[in-house]
Amino acid sequence: MEKPLVRGEKIIISKFEDSLQSFILDFSCPHRQEDIFDVDVFAFMINGQNQVAKKNIIFYNQPMSTCGSLAYHGDQDHKKMKKTFTVDLKKVPANIEKIAFACSFYKEMSKEKHIIYPKICLQVYDKIMNEAVFELEEEVDLINSKSMIFGDIYRYKGNWKFNTVKYQHQEHLLYWMREIYTLYII
């Protein structure tokens, strides 16, 4: 049974010795509103020196990490926008400390007045058991935000944990990756 998370909450998703370390992360917007806005989702792998390799920024145009631990799958549904990542924690290189999940918003300016606060949902599923582990649903301020980080998976004392962040920003993704998240793009 899935657990609803709130901003700032952390949850153990796997222990390093667990045999089960494969997950599916679904991002969705319940109501189809592509005539008003669109969402691109990204995942990026961060090493212990706070660096992100360009080849490990995963999105629609670069759908697989070099190590095969993270993959993007676009998905269309007539009732909602949906984007999916698969994560295999066993394949994450030892130097990677964190995998962050973010999105950029693209809206049609002439229709901005119609945008209130759509809900974006992140659901995490156990890939083998096909069971929901947790979900995070957040309203998004599309008028004042161009990008958002939902959360990250990180290593901590023998566990992989998920940290809910919900950090919205007026700048595009690369800006806050460098400036706010203090990452170096290599």
Image (spheres, helix red, strand yellow):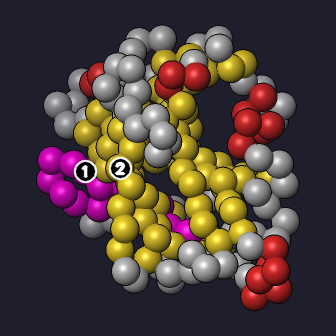
Please determine whether, in this image, residue 178 is positioned above or below residue 49: below
User: Dot 1, how many residues are within 10 Å of its Cα: few (below 14), some (14-19), or many (20+)?
Assistant: some
Q: Residue at x 40, y 38 (%)?
A: 63
Magenta-tinted stretch: 120-133
Q: Which mark is residue 73?
A: 2
Q: How many marks?
A: 2
Secondary structure, mark 2, is strand
Please determine whether, in this image, residue 1 is positioned above or below residue 61: below
Q: CA distance from mark 1 to mark 2?
A: 16 Å
Please state which amino acid type lies under the numbered disc 2: His
Q: Residue at x 54, y 31 (%)?
A: 57
Nearer to me, 129 or 186: 186
Q: Which mark is residue 126?
A: 1
**On the picture, is 103 further left or further right than 74?**
right
* Residue 165 spot, x, y in % from top left: 64, 50
Which quadrant of the rendered structure holds the C terminus? Answer: top right
Nearer to me, 159 or 83: 83
* Residue 73 spot, x, y in % from top left: 35, 50
Secondary structure, mark 1, is strand
User: Dot 2, how many residues are within 10 Å of its Cα: few (below 14), some (14-19), or many (20+)?
Assistant: some
